[in-house]
Image (cartoon, rainbow, N blue to C red):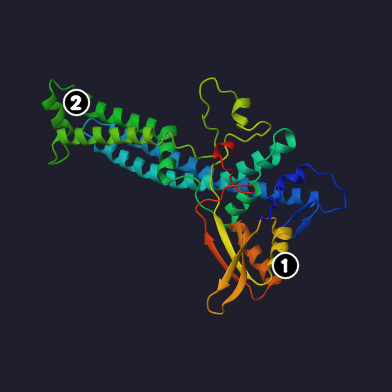
Amino acid sequence: MTENPKQNPNDFFQQEPASDEPVWTYRGYKIKTSEFVTAMVHFFRAEVQRANVWRQRLDATTNWAVISTGASLSIAYSQEDIHHTVILLNILLISIFLYIEGRRYRYYELWSYRVRLMETDFFAPMLVPPFHPSSDWAEGLAEALLEPSFPISIWEAIGRRLRRNYLWIFLICGLAWFAKYWLFPAPPVNFAELASRAAIGSIPGSIIIFMNLIYFLLLIILAIVTAPMQHASGEVLPRFGAGLTMDHALHTNQPGKTQPWFRIRKRRQQFIAFIITDLAKEVSDHILAELNRGVTALEGKGMFTAKAHSVLMCAVTTTEINNLKKIVRKADLNAFIIITPAQEVLGKGFLPLDEDQN
């Protein structure tokens, strides 16, 4: 195998070339420090604006839930003869708001993930010299732009919003509902009288009480089960154990290396490219020089022509496929390319063999 380690984009921060010399060379692009920083700053401002828009939408949904709860309780307690069903209907409405807010929270995380990636791996290294950005932060950011996907599941989003805001709203509604048919017109003398007050039409009160207890129990279970899900990056999350300091959390197991504790452990899409060519030296030289990826040469034979060919194998990410095609086409128009998804690619330029080290 020809070894040519993936060029670390972070070398940009460690070099001090002449002011008129291009300092950022990445896949054929050459720009100066000021041009690159200006572009990234404008990009950061745009992503912050997007995140703020969805953050405001989250607040709007929560406000709807609070306002509807206040209105329903005001109506329910305004007169004794108003049925407690008003509060139950509000609980149903709040559940719909919770689902809507969960969906909005996923969009908020989509934009917030990019903001956090910029903060931890672009701006932070400028402020704290020992704190180096991750070696794949540029790849991760590029893939997030080319193939955006939600960083968190709908269940994590709903569970997080439930624990943050909606459990308290549900608790208030549940207590208000119980107090409504318990206190009016007077406290019941036995459970039979209590159950009769909870009845809705032909549905017995005992069934209504049982269904509400089951529903609130399911909400509590949902809040507990989704608590370990920690993929959200847009908020300051309590991920530290007892006695764990920030300095310890920032450092990885490898001496001299640091990593933001809030970095999302998102596996990038990886591919294996097989290139069948008669110009193996030319093609591999171009890949090594322009793509900075290692290439392995294998011996092959075309069974139809009985002619020997070289088969080049190269591991790439989704953001490098188009560049690989251009490179091969430039070196050998008669080359044959097969690109297939890889389950895992471990090693230099990708994830380390021991993932805990990254």
Upstream in sequence: badge 2 or badge 1: 2
Q: Label 1 belongs to which residue?
A: 282
In this orientation, which residue lies closer to the viewer: 210 or 274? 274
In this orientation, which residue lies closer to the viewer: 334 or 228? 334
Q: Secondary structure at mark 2?
A: loop
Look at the picture and state if 172 lies above or below 3. above
Q: Quadrant of residue 197?
A: top left
Name the residue: 17% across, 39% down: 200
Residue 9 marker: none
In this orientation, which residue lies closer to the viewer: 170 or 132? 132
Question: Could you tell me how far apart the alpha carbons at marks 2 and 1 are, in whole angstroms?
Answer: 91 Å
Name the residue: 65% across, 34% down: 258
Amino acid type at mark 2:
Pro
Amino acid type at mark 1:
Glu
Q: Position of residue 139 (x, y in %)?
A: 63, 51
Q: Label 2 belongs to which residue?
A: 185
The quarter of the rendered structure image containing the C terminus is top right
Of all residues, the one furthest to the bottom in this rendering is 305
Look at the picture and state if 356 lies above or below 104. above
Q: Position of residue 211 (x, y in %)?
A: 22, 36
Q: Residues within 10 Å of mark 1 (few under 14, many from 20)?
A: some
Name the residue: 72% across, 32% down: 130
Q: Could one spot residue 74 in this view of the protein?
A: no
